[in-house]
Amino acid sequence: MTALTFYGGVNEIGGNKILVEDEKTKLLFDFGQSFNFGEGFFTSWLGPRQLNGLGDYFEFDLLPRIRGLYSKEQLASTGFSYVEPQINALFLSHAHFDHINHVQFVDPAIPVYLGAGTKLFMESMEETSGFCRYGEHSCHKFRTRGKISIDDVVVEPVHVDHSIPAAYGFIIHTTNGAVVYTGDLRMHGPRKDLTEDFMEKAKESEPIAMISEGTRMVEKETRKNYSEAQVKDLCDEIVSSTDKMVFVIHYSRDMDRFRSFYRVAKKNDRQIVVSPKTAYLLTKLLSDERLDLPDPLKDDRILVYYKRKKSGTFDEKDYYAWERNFMDKMVTYEYILRNQKGLIMDLDFYQFAELIDIKPSPASSFIHSMSEPFSEEDIEDQVMHNWIDHFKMHFHQLHASGHMAREQLEELINYIQPKKVFPVHTENQQLFKQHCRNVQTIEYGKKYSL
Ligand SMILES: [Zn+2]
């Protein structure tokens, strides 16, 4: 018996939690958090109480009651009794929140298999944020095409291109045939070749089932999407045609995007200003030589922005220990204010108050290099525009998605020719049915035998 059960990513983008059973073997693929997780019961300062473990989550059925999955500590206040692990292993496709965040609840006795790069991202998040803890799991790092045997199942991770390095899809060789899981993937990124490798391997395996992401499975896209190369070129046009400051905002773990801005800075002989958090992440990722990223401590093009904290005098003691590593590369608002035309600065939305000190001169550029807002009533988006207008900056929208467009998804599925397609990580399962053959739409918690 081989079966699939979906506990997340069902009629939603993200939050993947996929159970693959083969005879007595139980494997989980991803254990992420939905983007709208708990929003019916929790909002802003009203959140689940950490000390109550899973209790506050189970109260509202926010997490599945799977026996032998959660840690004793997390279950203590739930009335759902702890038993020894009944899940053999947890596999993680990549280090995005919607694929890994609920790992914190999982029994540490369950081994976690993940890409070497994914481990670095998770460590960096734990080390630089006050609230992020994934627990003490035994972590087994894989590289592409390593084969992992668990009982009679062999799991083969194959790299894919996505908006974070070290993203993988999986070919799960069960006793009844191969099950392919795409993770999140795209074809228009700088490492399209990785996704092509995955396509080849997946096709060769003649899968009995394919679990396919479908983020961009929509009839018609309304939001502008570029390739990463276009993002870089358009950014270069903006930077090369101004002698004013250029600010950029982007997803902090999208290293392709960082590389694009870094290259534009180099081409235009500007320096790039990053936060201590980004500098820390870059340092961490240096140990993965395949990523080819600059060393913020050695590279003269990179400066690290320190905002005023506590004493307001940039005293070492004002900063966390991990932040202090980069003080040799420190610049403050005064430096930025005086050197505007020679800089590109990473500026996170939550750090916008720094603009008051930096005083960007009118007609500076602001590049929003993230998804456009999903709704016109997006409050953060309105606030962002108010700030940009207040400082008389020019706004630019430039983004390349981490996901395949609908036509590419169709091509992917047609090429791999699975016997069955299970759409996950999508709001449009029905569209899969219209555009692809052999589609099995999924329901939350229902077991599908293969
Ligand atoms: Zn995702």
Image (cartoon, rainbow, N blue to C red):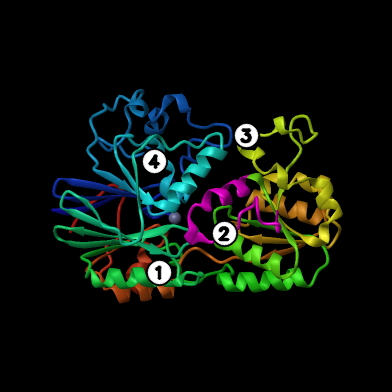
**Gap between marks 3 and 1, in whole Å?**
39 Å
The quarter of the rendering in which ligand 1 is drawn is bottom left
Q: CA distance from mark 3 to mark 4?
A: 26 Å
Q: Is residue 85 left or right of residue 7?
A: left
Per the image, the residue denoted by label 3 is 321
Q: Earlier in the sequence, mark 4 or mark 2?
A: 4
Give the vertical position of 148 relative to 332 (above or below). Answer: below
Give the labeled residue for mark 2.
Answer: 293
The numbered mark at residue 261 is: none
Name the residue nearer the viewer: 365 or 95. Answer: 95
Mark 3, secondary structure of its residue? helix
Would residue 78 appear left or right of 128 to someone viewing this image? left
Along the horizontal axis of the image, is 299 left or right of 154? right
Residue 35 appears in the picture as rendered: no
Residue 30 on image: x %, y %: 36, 49
Of discs 4 and 2, which sits in the foreground?
2
Magenta stretch encompasses residue 278: yes
Secondary structure of residue under mark 4: helix
- The type of residue carrying mark 1 is Thr
What is the x, y in percent for residue 194? 41, 68
Which is nearer the N-term, disc 3 or disc 1?
A: 1
Q: Tell me where residue 175 sits by quadrant.
A: bottom left
Mark 4 to mark 2 CA distance (whole Å) = 28 Å
Q: Nearer the viewer, residue 434 or 339?
A: 339
The answer to which of marks 3 and 4 sits earlier in the sequence is 4
* Callout 2 amino acid: Leu
Question: CA gap, disc 4 to disc 1?
Answer: 26 Å
Nearest to viewer (mark 3 / mark 4): 3
Task: Magenta stretch: give its range.
Answer: 277-302
Q: State the SS at label 1.
A: helix
Label annotation for residue 103: 4
Q: What residue does disc 1 label? A: 195
